[in-house]
Image (tube, rainbow, N blue to C red):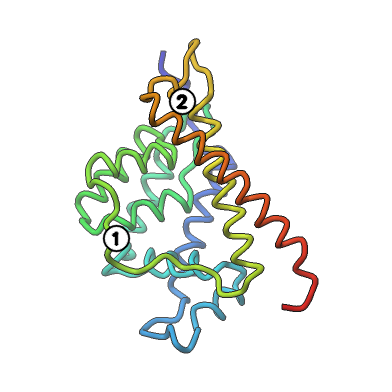
Amino acid sequence: MSPTRRLTIPDEVKQAIAKVREFYRLGQGAPTGRNHGQNLIASHAKKVGLNEDTMRKARVFANPVLGYGQEELNGLIDQLETHVYSDNGWQFGRTHIVRLISIKDREGRKTLQDEVIDRELTCSELERLIRQRYGARKRAGRRRYLPRRRGELLSEIDHECDRWSRWWQTLKRIDEDTSRFDQLPKGVQAKLREVAKAIEELQKSAQLAAAKRKKPE
């Protein structure tokens, strides 16, 4: 049975669309050029209340060559405003954009965008779709941003551990008397248990170290 569709745009969806516009505007205002040594992106991100990695993604989003030109942005907004939303509370947000701009093929990206909105895909579903069509992400290209300060790095480790732990709990979740975990080979299950235990210990260590950061480094 298909979900009930709403004929008017819910207020929360209007807010989500406004955030898409704002993310693009922030990207337009980001410093351009090869400024890594001058740390311009980091200082600008701090000024507008974003972390550096998010600021870089906003800059790519607003880049008419690498991301979305004004016409493409207008097309995206038009799709979001004319879409007939279901009652499941789905919204298109910043993380959808981040996933979509990882696709350099503009036609392929537009096809994915259409599917995301038409089918109201979550970010996880979109990421799986990208992996199916484009394969795993290549190691080449810009390295992932990591904080320079120890406290921020500890916080990043805590965040990544928490993210993996939530994935682990989802994997083990019982659904119709079984779980995805039960479907895996025994050897893989054993290794996953080892990883889960190691990540739990790592997260505790990172949290403990962060709690002791009041002492001078």
Residue 166 in the image, given as x and y percentages of width and height: 56, 38
Q: Residue at x 47, y 14 (%)?
A: 178
Mark 1 sits on what residue? 139
Mark 2 sits on what residue? 5
Can you say whether 63 is above or below 79 in the image? below
Within 10 Å of disc 2 (Cα), the crowding (few <14, some 14-19, many 20+) is: few
- Sequence order check, earlier mark of 2 and 1: 2
Which amino acid lies under the numbered mark 2 shown in the image of this protein? Arg
Instruction: Decide if residue 208 is on the left or right side of residue 176.
Output: right
Instruction: Decide if residue 183 is on the left or right side of residue 150.
Output: left
Instruction: Decide if residue 103 is on the left or right side of residue 19.
Output: left
Which quadrant: the C terminus? Answer: bottom right
Marks 2 and 1, Cα distance to the nearest angstrom?
41 Å
Residue 72 in the image, given as x and y percentages of width and height: 30, 58
Nearest to the observer: residue 189 or residue 2: 189
Which quadrant: the N terminus? Answer: top left
Circle 1 SS class: loop
Q: Residue at x 53, y 56 (%)?
A: 19
